Image (spheres, helix red, strand yellow):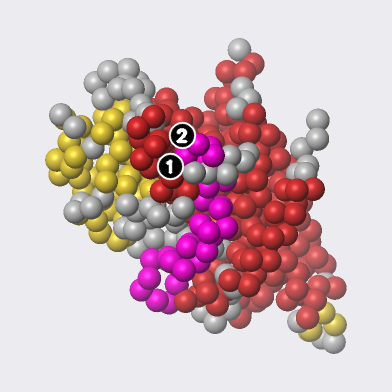
Amino acid sequence: MNFEFSDEQNLLREQALGFLTDHCPYSAVRAILDGDAPYDEELFRQVAELGWTAVVIPEAYGGLGLSYLELSVIAEELGRAVAPLPFSSSVYLATEAILKAGSESQKEKWLPRLATGEVVGTFALGEGPGQPRPEKLTTTACAGALSGVKIPVADGDVADFAVVVAKSDTGDGASLYLAQLDGVDREPVGTLDPTRSHAKIAFDNTTAEPLGNDGEGWTTTQRLLDRAAVLFAWEQVGGADAALEMAKAYALERYAFGRPIASYQAIKHKLAHAYVKNTLARANCYYGAWALDTDADELPVAAATARVSATQAYYYASKENIQTHGGMGFTWEFDCQFHYRRAKLLSVNIGSETSWQDKLIGAIERDAA
């Protein structure tokens, strides 16, 4: 079985890398970090014009009708660039939710607008500390109106609509709703990585429409998270590779006692360990991309494996990048911080590493039964 990307997909990678190198240098990321804008609106417009937001949307709804392999390639390059965009919330989660659970009328209304980047979507699951569970949900829906608080919601302060997980008294204990966010009370939430904005959203009898069947929301959510986990893992692998390259470049040019610090074993071992972790994570991501694109039965195992290994790889590479840079790596002026911030944020955005380890164990046990 060949898990490598095709020549066409690698050409797409080269094009994406070239575009992001020109239009999303670290100075652009720093501008969002230091400024008041929640994301780079011009960059998002350009990304949409390139069709990246439309990759897996069928042509019948204004999309490109390509595969999840192409989207995985784009996800990796966005992670490498630490792109300050609401791409993951809108594409990996909101778009996917409508594709998998939406009615025909919902698809006709939202998918063309998501494809062009006219609207931004998000996925509202969390309600505070701790891992979400159906029995812990407090957001409710009554007669087409949502009430409750979701926090933190990635890109919740800029999204036009949200797919909301609400409590249900039937089925698996949850249902999905689609709510437009015009006029809804939203409050920005600070995180370690301000280049990816988050918000607290308070629903107060907010008009919403069901997305999918009542009482099937939790099952659908878990499937959506498995699918999104593969794409987030590709972002993490892209970031991990960029952090390793940054550390390697600095180690080759920084001299101590008359020779490059890259020649010292202490530095060599750090970079070698990062390379091994990155390579393992990439192998798992290939497996995850295959399972996602083919909707294979192995997807829960593949997604959890990719997610855990990519989380570990990105954190290690970003941390050792700072260590390799020494005291200067800890300063605001150096760019090492961008990958460390993003690594920490991505490690919890759709569930902690521990929760995905639990999912992996559970999936393996089910397969072995």
Q: CA distance from mark 2 to mark 1?
A: 8 Å
* Residue appearing at x 61%, y 22% in the figure: 297
- Asked if one can make out residue 316 in the rendered structure from this viewpoint, the answer is no
| Outermost residue toward the top in this view | 369
Residue 73 in percent (x, y) is at 66, 50
Residue 207 lies in the magenta-colored region = no
Q: Which residues are magenta?
A: 32-61
Residue to which mark 1 is pinned: 111
Which amino acid type corresponds to the residue marked 2 in the rendered image?
Answer: Leu
* 193 or 12: nearer the viewer: 12
Residue 132 in percent (x, y) is at 36, 36
Residue 354 in percent (x, y) is at 51, 40
Which amino acid type corresponds to the residue marked 1 in the rendered image?
Answer: Leu
Q: Nearer the viewer, mark 2 or mark 1?
A: 1
User: Picture quarter containing residue 68?
Assistant: top right
Examine the rendered structure and indicate whether residue 127 appears above or below residue 169: below
Residue 322 in percent (x, y) is at 62, 70
From the viewer's perspective, is 102 left or right of 307?
left
State which quarter of the image contains the C terminus.
Answer: top right
| Outermost residue toward the bottom in this view | 258
Residue to which mark 2 is pinned: 99
* Residue appearing at x 34%, y 58% in the figure: 158
Examine the rendered structure and indicate whether residue 302 appears above or below residue 333: above
